[in-house]
Every structure is written in structure tokens, then in C-alpha cells.
Image (tube, rainbow, N blue to C red):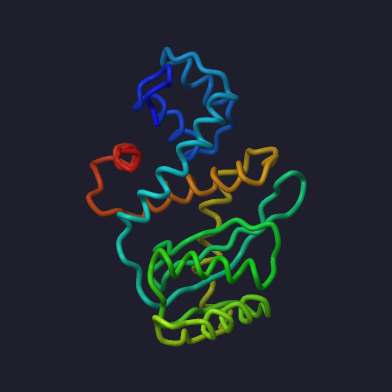
Amino acid sequence: MFKYHRYPKVVILQAVYFKLRFSLSYRDVEELMEIRGVKVDHSTLQRWVFKFSVLVEKNMHKRKFKVSDSWRMDETYVKVGGKDRFLYRAVDKEGSTVDFLLTKRRQKMSAQKFFNKAIGNNGAPRLVNIDKSGSNKTALWAVNKRSLSFNKIKIRQVKYLNNIVEQDHRRVKRRIVNYTGFKEFESAQRTLAGIEVVNIILKNQIMDSKDTTFKTFLSLAA
């Protein structure tokens, strides 16, 4: 994936890491890279994030420690193209990230798509705690109805137990606080995935992690 790029892998991934780890605009990252002697346009930086976030997410799922079988699931909104889009997220009872998915709508099919992704990457939980959202509950009913390879998931709706995932949303929101808003859905989806990966590294959820967060991030792009 790095073969035809002007700069070596470590330089490219350092720029991508800056964008995903800190609350910086692309022009901020452009200036930081210039200080380090690397002249790269902010639009190129955006393409790098778009391209390599997919790679690090894929490898992250292969190396993420197993989460517990008790999940807390909730969604938060993100502005994309001036419209509210919905980021579905789940953590386990210890606060470890389970999975995430940006969707265009807040509805049963969106929640079901999230659960299918989370179960595919982590296995089925014993229990999921959700808010009072009818769409989330209906989505879990649908997942249970179609389950053939796992036991029925217990559904619990206790508001205060979801405080842990609501607080965890802020980790992501802090990264995008200086953004004017994402312009395109797929770009938002990939950038947010990269931000989630960095947060997972910071939570020490990666097997064979290195001595720094950046080196672990670099290893996920191998």
C-alpha cells in the first residue's frame, strides 16, 4: 500500500497518527509536518487518513484483546455535510471498546447492522445494556431471532449503567471538537474508525503492543 508514495511509511503514518490522536485540523498537521521538513498538502493528508485508517482498523480487530460478555451500547450524533449522522458504539462493563459504526440514520436497521458487526468481530455477548430506545431493542430482538450459532442475548435497559459508554463518547468527540464538520459520509466513517483505533490502543486493548502508542499504531499498518 505504501509502494508508490513519495514519502516512506513511517512519515506517512506519523502524519495520519497526528490527525487521529490529537484535535488538529488538516492544515495544523500540514504545518507540523513542514516543521519536520516534510512538505505535504493538507488534501494529501486527508487522502492518507482515508486510505490507511481502513488498514489499521482491519488489523486492530485481529489483535484486540477479547472483551467481556456484558456490553453497554449507545449512539451519539456526528455532523456530516451539515446533517446529523449517528455513531453507534459499545463498551464492555470494564470500559473496553467493543466496536463502533457510523450510520446515516438512527433506526432499527442501523442498530442491527452495528450489532452484526460487533458480534462478527467479538463474538456474541451474554447481555447488552441499552437506553430506552425502541429501535435498539427491536434490533436486538431481530438479532436474537436469527441467531443460530449463539445463545439468545439478554436485553437490559438500566439508564445509569450506560453512563460508562456515554462518558466514553467524549473520547471521540474531543478529537473532532475543532472540526468544521465532515463533508462526506465515507470520509467521516474512515476518520472516526481511525480515531477509535487510537483510543483502543490508549486503553491497552492491543495484543503485542509496543512501548509507545505511535509504535503500536505503526505496527497495525504492517
Residue 163 point in image, percent of width and height: 53, 71
148 with respect to 114 (left or right): left
Q: Quadrant of residue 27?
A: top right
Q: Count of labels shown?
A: 0
4 with respect to 42 (left or right): left
161 with respect to 221 (left or right): right
Residue 38 point in image, percent of width and height: 44, 15
The foreground one among 101 and 29 is 101
Residue 44 point in image, percent of width and height: 55, 24
Q: Quadrant of residue 3?
A: top left
Quadrant of image for the N terminus = top left
Quadrant of image for the C terminus = top left
Q: For the view shown, which residue lies furthest in the right direction?
A: 82
Question: Residue drawn at (68%, 80%), measured in percent from left and top?
Answer: 134
Question: Residue drawn at (56%, 31%), measured in percent from left and top?
Answer: 46
Question: Residue drawn at (61%, 65%), measured in percent from left and top?
Answer: 75
With respect to residue 69, does 80 lie above or below?
above
With respect to residue 185, does 138 lie above or below?
below
With respect to residue 94, does 10 lie above or below?
above
The foreground one among 171 and 115 is 115
With respect to residue 155, does 103 lie above or below?
above
The foreground one among 103 and 82 is 103
Residue 177 point in image, percent of width and height: 62, 43
Question: Residue drawn at (53%, 37%), measured in percent from left and top?
Answer: 50
